[in-house]
Image: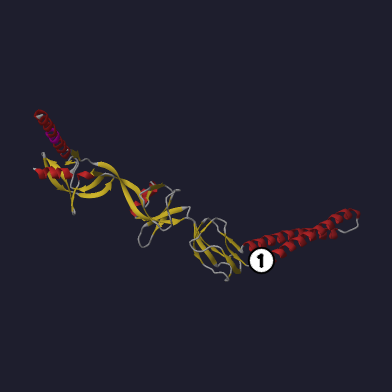
Amino acid sequence: MKSKYYSLSAFFISLFFAIIYSKSLLADTLFEVIDQKKEQIVVLDATIEAINKATVSSQTSGRITKINFDTNDYVEQDSIILEMTNKEQGAQLAAAEANVLRTQAAYNESKLNYDRYKKLFPKGAISQGQLDQAAATAETNKQLIKAAQAGLIQAKESLDYTIIKAPFAGVVTERHVEIGETVNPGAPLFSGMSLTNLRAITEIPQRYLVALRNNPEFIITLSDGSKLFSNKITLFNYADQQSHAFKVRIDLPPTEKLLLPGMWVKVQFVWGESKMISVPSSAILTNNELNAVYRDVDGKAVLTQVRLGNSLDNEVEILSGLHSGDKISIDAYQKLQQLGAK
């Protein structure tokens, strides 16, 4: 029994020292620092806005009799959003229709008269002047028909203007009238915007102008971390007089993500390449505002302060403190524990 006990104890002791030895090897694992070519990325704040937004105005005179939607309501395209009185427009339409019939009848009569005169003229029953006058009367009545038909079209349009329809599907942002109000042509009725076609608006400093013209590709990062890609941009050809920045409109692709006008997003683009040093995040030892790594100098771990840049996945950009060829401990905190145990 004792021999079994001692052999089992020896096994656990050897396993314990093997674990300690493997941790020591991991702590002593070194990472060689090298210069790498990395894309220089510009990250900016942007605002979502609707591409289609408009204010519907009155195109005729009338009194508001019915309002079907209010602010913040969603409206389908061609839905009737407002109705006005149409008695005057209806009377004008009836008069226009009667005028078309009257001119048509006058033309028919003058055309028959002209046809009769053409048959009588070779027989000498009428003069050349009477024939010419009949032809002119028929032509005049023909032109009067066209004028009457144009008046009919105008009357129909005027009647249609009393029923206001949504020009596109979207949400009502403002209602400018109340029931019972009398409006004249040009008076604003409703304002709205489409939620289907959206774009992001941002401004870029002028030093990035050439790079963005050569490579117009953006990555849009939403609030939940998901990303959209777009190369359909509109870069303004003039700068803001105060900020001297250029406005950029970025058309967003269709997405099932929740995007509404007024939301903030992050947009980024590549404006060049540069040499940089990046190390694993695990190699960074942080204490308050101090960031450092354990640099290997002749087999000894020397704590070296570094200045950090952007974080890229599981790596961190080093702005200063290290040079190409340096070797550092890949796990700073295990190295710290190893040195503290000595």
Residue 220 lies within the magenta run? no
Up the image or down, 200 lies above or below 94; here it is: above
Residue at the location (17% across, 38% down)?
26
Left or right: residue 191 compared with residue 20: right
Residue tagged by mark 1? 89
Q: Name the quadrant of the C terminus.
A: top left
Predominant SS of the magenta segment: helix
**Where residue 328 appears, x then y in whole percent?**
17, 41
Q: Measured along the vertical axis of the image, is residue 46 above or below residue 29?
A: below
How far across and how far down the image is residue 128, in percent? 85, 58
The boundaries of the magenta stretch are 13-17
Image quadrant where residue 280 sits: top left
Image quadrant in which you'd find residue 273: top left
User: Vertically, is 103 above or below 197?
Assistant: below
Extreme residue toward the front, this view: 1
Identified at 84% across, 54% down, the residue is 115
Magenta residue check for 15: yes
Write the residue at 15% across / 47% down: 304
